[in-house]
Image (cartoon, rainbow, N blue to C red):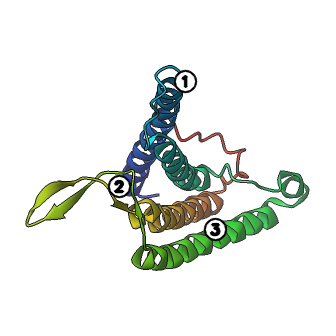
Amino acid sequence: MPRYLHVIDRLVHKVLTAFCGTLLMLMVVFTVYSVIMRYYFEDPPVWGDLLTVLSNIWLVFLALALTVRDRNHIALDLIYTRLSLRLAFIVQQFWSLVIFCLGIVIVYYGIQVVSTMGGRYWEMWYFAWEDGQIVFKPNYMPKKYAMAILPISGVLTSIAALMAVLEDSIRYAKGTFRLAGDDGTDMV
């Protein structure tokens, strides 16, 4: 793989990993805060549960791209071990291309959902870009903001699948290809 693609790949992986870690931490913080406010002060925040759920949804969709790139998604390892390396390579590439297509579907329908999503979260405040500056908007965050993860995740998943196909193809051509989970390249 060209050096610049490898550098970009590693950078995106680190940023996504950090963002997923942050979302996980926020889920814990929102939950603990909501529980303490509910049971000890009897004054739960109206936004606590919603932010926990939204953080969870974003975490899962972003982790999908990481999982695809690391080739840690569900694979039929038992079947792969029974196939010749060439046939296993073809099957693995096929599934990576299926995941690429799934990412495209998520992008396509995600854009439709975001562009047509109505409604607002009455308990959420948000920031908006107006007249060349960021403006604080009290209450009523549009629901389409939460759904924006769909096209973002679709793009990231498709790119991750293509990178996996490219990397595996290069390794196969060099004779260094191994099955997913057996190649010793942890994306740390």
Q: Residue 14's x, y, as percent?
A: 42, 42
Mark 1 / mark 2, whichever is N-terminal? 2
Q: Residue at x 57, y 50 (%)?
A: 60
CA–CA distance between discs 2 and 3?
24 Å
Which numbered marker is on residue 99? 3
Amino acid tagged 2: Tyr
Q: What is the spatial separation of the Cα atoms under label 1 and label 2, in whole angstroms?
A: 52 Å
Secondary structure beneath disc 3? helix
Residue 165, numbered circle: none
- The spot of residue 171 in percent (x, y) is 61, 57
Give residue 143's position: percent from left, percent from top.
42, 64
Q: Pick whichever, 126 or 18, lies toward us.
A: 126
Circle 1 residue: 39
Is 12 positioned to the left or the right of 77 in the image? left
Q: Nearer the viewer, mark 2 or mark 3?
A: 3
Amino acid type at circle 1 is Tyr
Whether residue 95 sits left or right of residue 65 in the image: it is right
Asked if the residues shown at circle 3 and circle 1 are in contact, with their CB atoms under 8 angstroms apart, the answer is: no
